[in-house]
Image: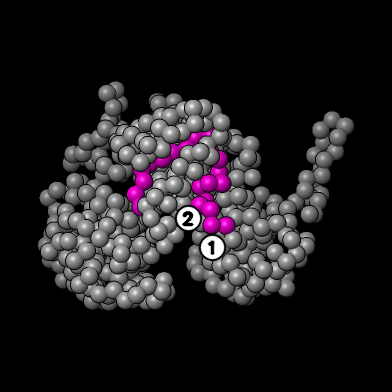
């Protein structure tokens, strides 16, 4: 470990601030490159490597002087002068740099382990659950920012109004973290959210997901029991009272944990938009749908638990416009409108479609859903989607055969997919060009298109597509 030349005087003591050398394997990852940028901003000596780096990570790393000169692994550059190795999930467990680090006995830490250590002296708010995590986290972040509160944060995707996914503020006493149940690193199969040890934990509901990791619902649910057990002594669990699993977990929490139940926030919609409402307060908000009102209920309780007043919360939540790729309006014209949402699990597909049909009751709703995740492309899991698209006037489902090959899943037939969804007005495509041609042929002035995917419909420019779809036909 090198010593920084900065000298800090405390009375008669002189302290040399240590500078840590950190190497990130698979630095091109979404969170990884943001972490690299933030660590450099904080004064760490940062290096990184990857065998493939795409935009926007490439440009951001290059601007910061952190872009590797080649997209290859450099095991020969791993040396004892590195204090900590942080591997991203793209690195895989047999990565040559990771192997070299193990041989040399260099400390290896996952992102959640490392971030926890950096925020160990701060009040940590960790948002968990099978759905709504990004939006709830973004709501909390927005309210704190608008109220002038300094805080650290770590999210799994971009949030409007924030430059990066990672922030370490030297003046903060709070850290806001999106907790996920995915493995922490190629070397650490423990879920990410097990590492954070929250003072305030949010549990927004549980619905089986990630079946490639958790083969049964019981094994998946157990991870949330462990999450609740990791709450700091005297901490708080904010949980959705209408979810049976969340309620059961809250009921089995330690006695020293304060349990705060919440429910869907009151709301109403009219031609002017959507309004969050209580007995004494009505606020026009830039989001809609019952699921987002559930998210709002969670964010409210978490903020209040962190010391934000109810008045301050409602004075600032009205300017929140939603998280990126979460019911994001892409285009609107000629009575036609296009939304894009990250929804991929059965519960979120159903909830997102319900939000659109409620918001636009007079429009013909066209649901376009891409099967992209391991779970959604698994024949055994497909029946979980039964009826999820029933609220659409027409439903289009797309899957990319290449995605099946990459995930090493067996070939799936269009007929199997149509049968699993259990509706008559569904069309299944495995060719993106044929899908787009069918969408372009849809006529009518009052049409709402809803695209749902954790992918990109085989590299489709969604903004350009949306702009084409709102042209009157």
Is residue 4 depicted above or below 104 in this figure? above
User: CA–CA distance between discs 1 and 2?
Assistant: 10 Å
Q: Which residue is nearer to you in this view: 299 or 65?
A: 299
* Count of picture labels: 2
- Secondary structure of the residue carrying tag 2 is loop
User: Which quarter of the picture shows residue 61?
Assistant: bottom right
Residue 253 highlighted magenta (yes or no): no
Quarter containing the C terminus: bottom left
What residue do we see at 46% from left, 33% from top?
253
Tell me where the magenta segment starts and ends, as one range. Answer: 188-208
Q: Which residue is mark 2?
A: 182
Are circles 1 and 2 on residues that touch, CB within 8 Å? yes
Quick check: 138 left or right of 16? left
Is residue 86 depicted above or below 51 in this figure? above
User: Residue 302 location in percent, x, y?
Assistant: 44, 34
User: Residue 369 location in percent, x, y?
Assistant: 27, 63
Q: Which residue is mark 1?
A: 89
User: Residue 184 location in percent, x, y?
Assistant: 54, 55
Residue farthest to the right, as pictured: 12
Q: Is residue 225 visible?
A: yes
């Amino acid at each position: 470990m090198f010593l920084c030349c900065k000298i800090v005087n405390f009375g008669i003591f002189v302290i040399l601030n240590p500078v840590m050398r950190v190497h990130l394997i698979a630095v091109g990852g979404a969170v990884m490159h943001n972490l690299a940028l933030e660590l450099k901003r904080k004064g760490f000596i940062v290096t990184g490597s990857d065998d493939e780096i795409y935009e926007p990570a490439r440009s951001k790393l290059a601007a910061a002087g952190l872009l590797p000169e080649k997209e290859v692994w450099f095991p020969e550059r791993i040396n004892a002068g590195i204090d900590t190795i942080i591997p991203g999930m793209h690195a895989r467990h047999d990565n040559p740099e990771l192997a070299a680090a193990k041989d040399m006995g260099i400390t290896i830490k996952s992102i959640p382990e490392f971030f926890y250590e950096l925020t160990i002296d701060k009040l940590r708010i960790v948002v968990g659950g099978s759905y709504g995590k990004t939006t709830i986290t973004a709501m909390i972040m927005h309210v704190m920012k608008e109220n002038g509160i300094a805080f650290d944060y770590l999210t799994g995707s971009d949030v409007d109004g924030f430059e990066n996914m990672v922030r370490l503020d030297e003046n903060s006493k709070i850290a806001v973290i999106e907790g996920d149940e995915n493995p922490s690193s190629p070397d650490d199969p423990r879920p990410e959210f097990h590492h954070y040890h929250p003072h305030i934990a949010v549990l927004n509901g549980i619905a089986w997901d990630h079946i490639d990791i958790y083969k049964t619902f019981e094994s998946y649910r157990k991870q949330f029991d462990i999450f609740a057990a990791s709450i700091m002594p005297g901490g708080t669990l904010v949980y959705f009272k209408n979810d049976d699993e969340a309620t059961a977990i809250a009921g089995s929490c330690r006695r020293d944990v304060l349990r705060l139940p919440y429910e869907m926030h009151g709301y109403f919609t009219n031609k002017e938009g959507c309004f969050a409402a209580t007995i004494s307060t009505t606020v026009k908000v830039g989001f809609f749908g019952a699921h987002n009102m559930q998210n709002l209920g969670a964010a409210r309780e978490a903020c209040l638990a962190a010391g934000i007043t109810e008045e301050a919360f409602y004075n600032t939540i009205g300017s929140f416009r939603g998280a990126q790729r979460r019911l994001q309006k892409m285009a609107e014209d000629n009575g036609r409108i296009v939304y894009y949402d990250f929804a991929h699990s059965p519960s979120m597909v159903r909830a997102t479609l319900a939000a659109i049909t409620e918001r636009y009751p007079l429009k013909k709703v066209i649901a376009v859903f891409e099967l992209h995740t391991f779970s959604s492309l698994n024949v055994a899991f497909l029946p979980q989607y039964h009826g999820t698209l029933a609220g659409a006037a027409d439903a289009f489902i797309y899957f990319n055969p290449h995605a099946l090959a990459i995930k090493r899943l067996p070939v799936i037939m269009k007929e199997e997919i149509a049968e699993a969804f259990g509706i008559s007005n569904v069309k299944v495509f495995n060719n993106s060009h044929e899908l787009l041609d069918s969408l372009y042929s849809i006529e009518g002035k009052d049409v709402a298109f809803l695209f749902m995917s954790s992918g990109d419909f085989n590299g489709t420019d969604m903004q350009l597509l949306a702009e084409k779809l709102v042209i009157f036909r």
